[in-house]
Image (cartoon, rainbow, N blue to C red):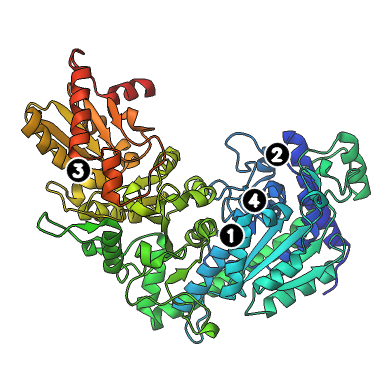
Amino acid sequence: MGFGELDQKAINTIRLLAVDATFTSNSGHPGAPMGMAPVAHVLWNNFMKFNPKNPKWLNRDRFVLSNGHGCMLQYALLHLFGYDLSLDDLKAFRSVDSKTPGHPEAHDTPGVEVTTGPLGQGVSNAVGLAIAQAHTAATFNKPDFTLVDNYTYCFLGDGCLMEGISSEASSLAGHLQLGNLICVYDDNNITIDGDTNCAFTEDVSKRYEAYGWQVLDIEKGDTDLDAMQKAFEQAKAEKNKPTIINLKTTIGYGSLQQGTHGVHGSPLKKDDIKQLKEKFGFNPEESFVVPKEVSELYGKHASEGAAAEEEWNKLLASYAEKFPKEHADLTRRLKGELPEGWEKALPVYTPADPAVASRKLSETVLSKIIDVVPELLGGSADLTGSNLTRWKQAVDFQPKSNGLGDYSGRYIRYGVREHAMGAIMNGLAAYGTIIPYGGTFLNFVSYAAGAVRLSSLSQIRCIWVATHDSIGLGEDGPTHQPVETLAHLRALPNNMVWRPADGNETSAAYYVAMTSKHTPSVLALSRQNLPQLEGSTIEKAIKGGYVLHEVEKADVTLVSTGSEVCICVDAAKYLKEKHNVNARIVSMPCFEVFDTQSKEYRLSVLPDGIPSLSVEVMSTMGWERYTHEQFGLNRFGASGAYKDVYNKFEFTPEGISKRAVATIDFWKDVPNVRSPLNRAFQQII
């Protein structure tokens, strides 16, 4: 197709909206939007399928701005194509409570698919979105009923490519032959530190060819719209490889500072904006101008998208008649509802049942619910046999051509790529038809900290099956034994950390993780066997903390999680026999859920008048909110058989008892000992 003056006017409108918004807010990044406006225009107006009136239409094409600092490009596009984003919203760029925050946030702005900003995360999310599309299509599409055939488009920059997470995700995307993923690399040779020749001189094209991607090059990324058109056509024609378009652009195109790092992260000056608007044929005295003909051009494409959804809805109605079971499943998933009665599949235990490692208990839960919750899709970062994340009948998500599975498979072999796995799970969850889980050692969730943080910020439901949760993993030693990880993860807002003590608590952890639509969960699971506890139930554990063992005239409360709860049970017996001390026992598998309970309930679990001691083979940080004294591990662990390591650090009935007696002695002269919870309530007030 040919491009004319109207296309150029539309491109310059995008550029100037970004310029005006960053100038008005006196902050932001105008350079990338100015450089990428031409390719954005070609993509959004000529290729992307979407309906601005229904940003959640299933078969829309997904757009991810991985170089999220250039978000005014996306905001300008969303406004121009008719999403619920007004000119006033653009004028409120980067102001408190606006729909246009400083980086794209999925829950703030209609049309933003995933939260981006930390570089490399967005392109990794895009891989997740592409996997989700391929799996959903393989699951629901039927002959003559192509319900799902959307593409995922991603813009990314030098910073994204320098971050290691993008290498992890891109390598996996190439292996998986995701032909529905098309990326555009804004190759402008500029980062915050200046020209990329100071730190980034690799051949990106050769790297991506080695990953198994189709690589297309456009030398004149500022002006050659025809080349962009042809590149997208070629990208869509390639069905067995993801595509990266290496687009040579000029950052801040048209500015007096074009091509320099000065236009990367600072608004343009008044004189620069004046000459820029004159150069582009706009009135320099006016701001936030959208020519009528540009609105009409983009409105036409938006109308085409609305019509496409209308046709799709007709197809869906016919699909419902011919495939009622599949239609009901898809409709339920899109509503975010779980299958009715799914929780009945959760296993229940009694103290007569054998001791089992909680990683094995997790495997049992997965094997029980996988058939009744078909949207559950998971994998492991090359630790399947250790994480126990794969059920017996699982089919791997793989391209058919490699003979290892197919796209309908629900088990993903992530390889040794924890960080990419986390970001890919975020993309999977964002697609709308999948609940993702992923396995690794708890220690290596730290490798994925950036993605976990974005899960919480994005209000995304995904589940980390984090095994080998403590010094109890034994011989692998301090390098693998997490001591600080739970404190870090517990510090994240909107993130649940579960450390179950037995089978019922493991089932409870999965129940809450599955039913919490907008919160990620980390399940910290043991390598060593744990007994089934007297007094534990799913109903109690879903409150995050509960009284496992109550006594009359208690002298002390022992509060614990995971593998230490059963040791506290033995310690309570030892205290009674050796010291005539009455100890209550509280199990607190999840701080975050316990904190949501009523004040009355929490004080019934951790009441006034009784000194308390927490017991956990981790950093004690955070426990001071709940207990008067803390017994933990504020140092790295040790290598050896797990029982020997526990003995070394005195996590034994005798060691706990010694500290419990000391706690009682210290607090005996304090009249009316108040629960630390009361201090917390006072601070909140």
Mark on residue 91? Answer: 2
Which amino acid is tagged 4? Leu
- Left or right, residue 36 beside residue 381: right
How far, Cα to Cα, is label 1 from label 4? 10 Å
Front tag of 4 and 3: 3
Which amino acid is tagged 3? Ile
- Left or right, residue 374 beside residue 597: right
Q: Earlier in the sequence, mark 1 or mark 2?
A: 2
How far, Cα to Cα, is label 3 from label 2? 60 Å
Q: Residues within 10 Å of mark 3 (few under 14, many from 20)?
A: some
Mark 3 element type = helix
- The residue pinned by badge 1 equals 124
Which amino acid is tagged 2? Lys
- Quadrant in the rendering for residue 98: top right
- Disc 1, disc 2: CB below 8 Å? no
Q: Position of residue 86 (x, y in %)?
A: 66, 46
Q: Earlier in the sequence, mark 1 or mark 3?
A: 1
Residue 216 seen from this side: yes
| Front residue of this view, candidates 261 and 44 | 261
| Front residue of this view, candidates 197 and 149 | 197
